[in-house]
Image (tube, rainbow, N blue to C red):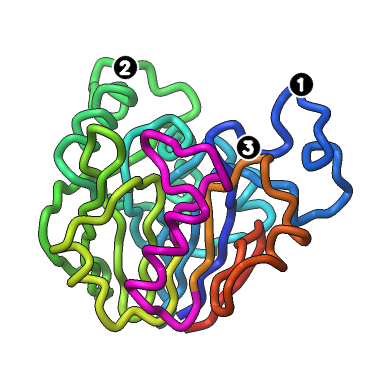
Amino acid sequence: MIVTFLGTGTSTGVPVIGCHCRVCTSDNPKNKRLRQSVKIEEGGRTCLIDTTPDLRLQLLRHPIAHLDFILFTHSHADHMMGLDDIRPFNFHQRETIHAYSNAGTARAIRRAFSYIWDDRSQVGGGKPQLDLHEVDAPFSASGIDVVPIPVIHGDWTILGFRIGKFAYITDTNGIPRQSMRLLEGVEVLALDGLRPAPPHPTHFTIGEAVEAAEIIRPRETWLIHLTHDLDHDSFDATLPPGIRLAYDGLQVEI
């Protein structure tokens, strides 16, 4: 399995529009963070987790020959508003793309992209062909076994996902005990670690993410959904062994 981090930034991306801080004006490519998503390749099949507003640029940088399915963590704009950019896969694959989410996220996607399912909408340049499935238990997609991991995101329960020895948990400020059990034996973990401080009502700080990683005990933890409060090189050097800041373009083989 190869996991490619297409974007590692928070909802604004980094640099932040109009900001002139040292991270936003840095020349270090690891301080350039598109919105958060990953692609996962295994056995000739490829999936995406989330479709960010930066999806087109991400897939021009890291192309996908064939998209088998999409996993949606939740319905915030920075995680789903690039959905229309799956149309080229429909064009050349000549098939509907399957997508999976919890029920609340599915309702939000159907509301935000209602034209996909509206036979009366004007087609124009085409519209995504999407078969959206609601999941609340382990399932198989294109022969890949996926375990949804319910996590807390403020007042919401959203989904992380586990595929084999890899787990992906973005946008969380709490992992319930039963979800911790679903993470037993994970070797590589991508985990929300928004910023050093102050505490945030819907995201782990770096310190909280480190505490969670030390409980889960993967071989590698890559912190994601990062703000412009984090200069990659200087902050990465302060983290405990086995815990690192992810960056756009990072590839991890599992």
The spot of residue 182 in percent (x, y) is 20, 70
Residue for point 30% across, 40% down: 153
Q: Is residue 24 above or below residue 4?
A: above
Spatial CA distance of label 2 from label 1 is 37 Å
The earlier-in-sequence mark between 2 and 1 is 1
Chain-order first, disc 2 or disc 3: 3
Q: Which mark is on residue 121?
A: 2
For mark 1, does the 10 Å Cα neighbourhood hold few (<14), some (14 to 19), or many (20 or more) residues?
few
How far across and down, in percent of the image, does residue 254 sit? 47, 84
- Label 2 sits on a secondary structure element that is loop
* Of callouts 1 and 3, the N-terminal one: 3
Residue beneath disc 3: 13
The residue beneath circle 1 is 18
The magenta region covers 191-220
Q: Which amino acid, by three-letter code, is at mark 2?
A: Ser
Q: Residue at x 56, y 61 (%)?
A: 5
Q: Quadrant of residue 201?
A: top left
Q: Is residue 229 magenta?
A: no
- Asked whether the residues under the numbered discs 1 and 3 touch, taking CB atoms below 8 Å apart as contact, a structural biologist would say no
Rendering coords of residue 239 (x, y %): 61, 67
Residue at disc 3, secondary structure: loop
Task: Give the residue type that dot 3 points to.
Answer: Gly
The residue that appears at 56% across and 66% down in the rendered structure is 4
Q: Amino acid at mark 1?
A: Gly
